[in-house]
Structures are given as C-alpha cells and as structure tokens.
Amino acid sequence: MIDKHDKVLLKDTAYDKIKEKMIRGDEEYTSENTLVQELSMSRTPIREALNRLQYEGFLKILPNRGIVFTELSVEERNELIDMRIAIETYSLKQAESRIRDHHIQELARIIGMQEKAYRAGDFADLVEKDALFHHYLLEIVGNSQFIKMYRHARERQFTVRAGKWLKNQPDILQTFIEEHRTILDAITRKDIPAAIQHLVEHLEKGKL
Amino acid sequence: MIDKHDKVLLKDTAYDKIKEKMIRGDEEYTSENTLVQELSMSRTPIREALNRLQYEGFLKILPNRGIVFTELSVEERNELIDMRIAIETYSLKQAESRIRDHHIQELARIIGMQEKAYRAGDFADLVEKDALFHHYLLEIVGNSQFIKMYRHARERQFTVRAGKWLKNQPDILQTFIEEHRTILDAITRKDIPAAIQHLVEHLEKGKL
DNA sequence: GTATACCAAGTTGTATACAGGTCTAATATA
DNA sequence: TATATTAGACCTGTATACAACTTGGTATAC
C-alpha cells in the first residue's frame, strides 16, 4: 500500500542497474552517455539515479568531467560499523521491556535458517539470513529511522568488495551463527546487558 | 577543498529555496511548474532538488498529481530523537578515552555563547549555538556518519514547526543551557556514565 | 626542441518538447 | 433531476536539444 500505482519508474530501474554495475566492480569510472547506451534509456532517469547514488555516497559526479565510483574506505567501513553498533545496541536496550516469547522464537527460527543455508553452502542465502537476524532485532522496537539507516549501512558495507572479504575467511560465517546464538541465549535469559555486550563484540569483528 | 570549482549549481539553490519555503510553512502543496515561476529556473534543477528532498523525507512526489510537503509527525519526531540519543550517547562513550582539556574548554566556550545569545534575546543565534554544543560533542570522535545523521535529524526536527514549538515555551531555552552545563560538569569530572545519563534526559525532553 | 595556442571530442548543466496519467467541471443523456 | 461522459487543464515521466566547461592532442611559433 505504498502507492496505489506500482508503475515502475525508469529512474528506479536505473538506480538498481547502476548499483549492480558497482557491485560487479568491473569499472571505476563511467559517464551518463555510457549508461544511456547500456541501459537503453534517456539521460533524465539516469541523472536522477546518479544524483541519488551520489547523496548516498556511492559515487561522485565531477561536473563536466565524469562519474567516479567511490571505493569503500577502511575509515568509512569502520564508521558504518560504529553506526550499526550505536543503533542496534540502543534499539536492543529499548526493546528490553517489550520482548515476548514470539520474538525469541522468531530469532531462533532465523538462526535455524542460517544454519540450513550454511549446510547447503548457499553463500548468498547465508548473507541474507544474517541480515535478517539483525533486521529483526530492530523490528522489535520498530524505529523506522533505525531500520532505514541500518539498511543503508549494510548495503554500503556489503556493496563494495564484500564478496572478496568474506570469501577470504569462509569460516567466519559459521562463527557469526554461533555469535547470533550467544546473543539470543542472553536475550532468552533476559540478560540484555550481556546480549548488548555480545552484539558489540560481534559487530566489532567486521572492522578492519 | 571540497572541489576546486565552487560554481553554485542551480539544483542546490533550488534545494535551499524549496526548503526555506517549507520552513515558512505557508503552503502544503506545490508543483514543478509553480516552482519554475517562483524560482525562475527550468524544471530540470527543480526536479533534482525535489528528488533529493523526497529521499530525505521532506516531501512526497505524487506521480502525475503534484508535490505534497510531509508534516513531521509525532512518531517521526520521537524516532529522530531516539536516533540522536543512540549516536550521541555512543559517540560520547567512545570519546571517553580521548577527551582532553581543550575539548572541555571549547564546550565551556560554546555554553558561554549560548548564554550570551540568551541574554541578547537572539532566538536564532541561541538555536544555532545549541546545535553547536551537540555537534561538538560528536566532533571529539569525529565519526562523519554520525555527524551526517545528526545534521539530518536536527534539520528535520527543526525545519517543520520548530519555531512554534519553541516559542510556546521560551523558558525551556534557558533550561537547555543549564542542562548543557550539567553534562559538561560530568564530563569535567570524568564521569562519562553520568554525562550520558544527563544527555539522554536532556534529549528526551524534546519528545512529544 | 620547447612552449604556447588552439581545436575537437567528450562531459555535465540547463532548458524545453512531447507523452501519458489524473482530476474537475461542464455537458449530454436517461 | 440524477447520472454518465467527455473535454480540457494540469500534472509528472521521459526524451532531446543546446550551452558551457574540461581535457588532451596537435599544430604553430619561437
């Protein structure tokens, strides 16, 4: 029920396509005309997508010179992780008085899906279910600002060179599952401070 | 050193002008063509500004129907305050080991400027210096993601109906100054947990 | 050989043209 | 009179035209 008209706008498809291009990471520069040919649409929706991506920090528009995709620096990566720590721990603290059994059951179910994906060796699915765990932690309170920021941080964190980083240490994925279980255990014991502490340690591991 | 060319783009002036229009709050709806006449520029830069403002949550573009400025709801307002609590308290916690005397002196100086603005009855200046205090607290660590988010939350919080709200209870501004001093006192005593507690209580007062 | 001037290609910034959806109100029709 | 229809004004989505700026190479002057 976002809007009665679900007509897909070209600027949104352009946004997705350009982002995909960035994730593939073949190129470092591009231009509007290049994208016009690649996406088979006019400059207008492409410009609108580029503007949005610039504000979100994914690229820089150099006036009269071109477009450069901005690499995720170590500093930005660590800052985004601190952002996640700030909002995820605070949301969990706020959630303390609202946690009910069905929340715990849902979190357990998500961890179960993670394990299933791990056993199946489905890398992409595992990453997605990992995100789901953190997302659901935020859903307990449901602060939409937190959720929006989380989505952004996560996307930026994983859009660029995420694949490489994770694939270099595949075992870390199993560790993540164990850590989620540790967090959930603390929540189940109603020991929120411990859960927060585990959550911080868990997220800190993503830093470089 | 943002960019060697500081040529102001029309889309940026459009962005500022439209925001000013929102702050004045005379109208609730508008259209691209209306803005074309009011701002004396073509639709292109106006559309780019509108797109940005939409992503930032200031307005909604209804396809083929028009543009509606989105009022700041009580829920969104409270969510933004929780966002500020999350990042400001976490940043202060991180700052604990880095706080030096010159930081404390600078914070005292800012409070001094607040008092001066209060005595002078300069409303706008007082609001600006209030923002400066919180901004500087974030600057100690300097997480640019935090700062960007703080700016957004603050702007959204104060863009719509801020004037009304504050002017209805003018004494609260003096209270704010006292609370800043309380926070700074705790920091000076190196009692960061207390400072955080005071900060939370201070920000919570903004909720409705 | 070196430095300068200039030109051509490519880029984004800006303006405008056209297409198609939405709403309103006048009008035709029962 | 009530209802359906239709025409027109207005809106944004999309495409394109034009202007101004950057850059790199080439020709020219010295």
Image: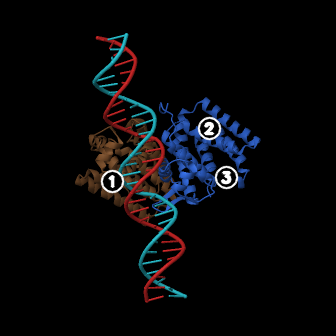
Chain colours: A blue, B brown, C cyan, D red
Q: Residue at x 69, y 37 (%)?
A: A113
Instruction: Report how far apart the C-alphas of labels 3 and 2 lie in the structure.
Output: 31 Å
Q: On the rendered image, what quadrant is the N terminus of chain B found in? A: bottom left
Q: Please tell me which residue lies in front, A71 or B43.
A: B43
Residues indicated by labels 1 and 3 sit on the same polypeptide chain: no
Q: Which residue is mark 3?
A: A163
Q: Indicate the position of residue A169 as horizontal and vertical percent values.
A: 72, 54
In terms of image quadrants, where is residue A195? top right
Q: What's the amino acid at mark 2?
A: Ile
Q: What's the amino acid at mark 1?
A: Glu
Camera-near label (3 vs 2) is 3
Disc 1 on helix, strand or loop? Answer: helix
Q: Which residue is mark 2?
A: A187
Disc 3 on helix, strand or loop? Answer: helix
Camera-near label (1 vs 3) is 3
Q: Earlier in the sequence, mark 3 or mark 2?
A: 3
Q: Indicate the position of residue A45 as horizontal and vertical percent values.
A: 48, 47
Relative height, residue B52 to residue B109 (above, below): above
